[in-house]
């Protein structure tokens, strides 16, 4: 007998409870951590809501990430019935994925990460200087959370200083709220063209950056351009939203800020677990298999709810409480298995540097509007806030 399918996965947290996953996900995790789910296109697949099953699925090579095989759990989300183009390694299975992953892993060297850490400190200080000069008062998304990762991506790819304003403008347009399909396509085309020009420049004039390093491999131009685009997409909007939402969480719970200063690395792991800005990840079974005693048939899509897994009381004590003293190891904010986020260490560095610097430089930082007036990105595929109005002036 087939169970009654549950509704498709919600697209975001309720605005009234911006840091809490929907209650129905928690109920499912307690009652049926692997449950049937009807997808918007009619596909009858599965939903995983427990931490243990999430890691099991994400580590199992019998589940595919290929876009032409999957069904998307949210109506209106981008879908594709075509294989990933060359270089888009995040949507490939081994052995294609393995080749790209190996080449890219070799570029995330200890030396490069150390250099980027120094630059992130400088970039963060520059934006805090600008905020102080124009403040008190700012939209933390526009003045802090978005431009810092945008500049870090420029450092990673080796975008020349003279071209950075143009590149960042195109890149931020890709994630601009309210953009029309035509505007999105124009931004997509502009970014691809820019990276194409950059690849040619790196081939002719290699420097000490990741894209230059990749031009020394056997990768073709199309592959290099698409890899650059993947790195941009993975490293800009996600980190920007994590910076903004992390700051918002701490502004709502200022008692947690001392723990951020005491151990930024540990605090960041808890923020990643608690906020879980990517709501789901999707896999499709390549063969018939058994999971949690249930039969998954080849071709059935399994959606892993990241917030539900990261709030599983079977793995994290009192999981609905933000506790920056908690040891939050094992969360799946960056995924798990062979597709775990390649740039996770860079994202961690950005968060470990930028968030403590923000609250050190502006100890009186606070929201300039009531919390209920903060508009959440609950209608988008990456959680965050649309704007975060703050001030740090005299309260009188």
Image (tube, helix red, strand yellow):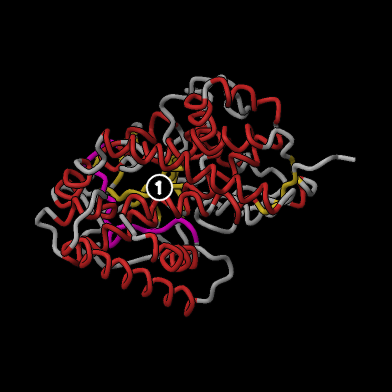
Residue displayed at 53% across by 37% down: 28
Label 1 neighbourhood size at 10 Å, few (<14), some (14-19), many (20+)? some
Can you give x and y, in whole percent of width and height, for residue 261 in the image? Answer: 58, 24
Residue at mark 1: 281
Can you give x and y, in whole percent of width and height, for residue 335 in the image? Answer: 37, 39
Residue displayed at 64% across by 27% down: 257
Does 52 appear above or below 338? above
Q: Which residues are magenta?
A: 59-74
Does 202 appear above or below 2? below
Does 80 appear above or below 291? below
| The C terminus - image quarter | top right
Picture quadrant of residue 326: top right
Residue displayed at 62% across by 47% down: 13
Q: Nearer the viewer, residue 65 or 36?
A: 65
Residue 339 as seen in the image, left or right of residue 254: left
Whether residue 170 is visible, yes or no, is yes
- Residue 70 highlighted magenta (yes or no): yes
Majority SS type along the magenta span: loop
Q: Which residue sits furthest right? A: 396
């Amino acid at each position: 007998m087939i169970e009654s399918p549950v509704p498709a996965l919600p697209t975001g947290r309720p605005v009234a409870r911006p840091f809490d996953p929907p209650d129905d996900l928690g109920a499912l995790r307690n009652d049926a951590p692997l449950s049937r789910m009807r997808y918007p296109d009619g596909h009858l697949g599965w939903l995983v809501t427990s931490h243990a099953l999430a890691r099991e699925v994400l580590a199992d090579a019998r589940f595919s990430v290929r876009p032409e095989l999957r069904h998307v759990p949210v109506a209106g989300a981008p879908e594709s019935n075509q294989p990933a183009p060359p270089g888009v390694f995040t949507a490939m299975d081994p052995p294609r994925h393995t080749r790209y992953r190996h080449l890219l892993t070799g570029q995330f060297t200890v030396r490069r990460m150390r250099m980027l850490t120094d630059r992130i400190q400088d970039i963060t200080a520059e934006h805090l200087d600008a905020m102080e000069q124009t403040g008190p008062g700012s939209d933390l998304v526009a003045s802090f959370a978005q431009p810092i990762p945008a500049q870090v991506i420029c450092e990673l790819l080796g975008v020349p200083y003279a071209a950075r304003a143009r590149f960042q403008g195109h890149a931020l347009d890709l994630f601009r709220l309210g953009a029309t399909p035509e505007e999105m396509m124009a931004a997509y085309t502009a970014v691809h063209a820019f990276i194409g020009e950059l690849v040619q420049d790196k081939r002719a004039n290699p420097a000490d950056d990741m894209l230059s390093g990749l031009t020394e491999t056997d990768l073709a131009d199309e592959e290099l351009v698409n890899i650059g685009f993947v790195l941009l997409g993975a490293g800009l909007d996600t980190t920007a939203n994590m910076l903004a939402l992390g700051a918002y969480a701490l502004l709502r719970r200022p008692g947690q800020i001392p723990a951020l200063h005491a151990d930024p690395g540990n605090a960041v792991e808890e923020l990643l677990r608690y906020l879980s800005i990517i709501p789901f990840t999707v896999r499709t079974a390549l063969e018939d298999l058994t999971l949690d005693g249930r039969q998954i048939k080849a071709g059935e899509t399994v959606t892993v709810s990241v917030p539900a897994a990261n709030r599983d009381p079977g793995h994290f004590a009192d999981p609905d409480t933000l506790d920056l003293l908690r040891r939050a190891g094992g969360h799946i904010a960056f995924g798990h298995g062979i597709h775990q986020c390649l740039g996770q260490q860079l994202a961690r560095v950005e968060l470990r540097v930028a968030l403590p610097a923000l609250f050190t430089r502006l100890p009186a930082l606070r929201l300039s509007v009531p919390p209920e007036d903060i508009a959440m990105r609950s209608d988008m595929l990456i959680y965050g806030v649309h704007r975060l109005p703050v001030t740090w002036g005299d309260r009188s």
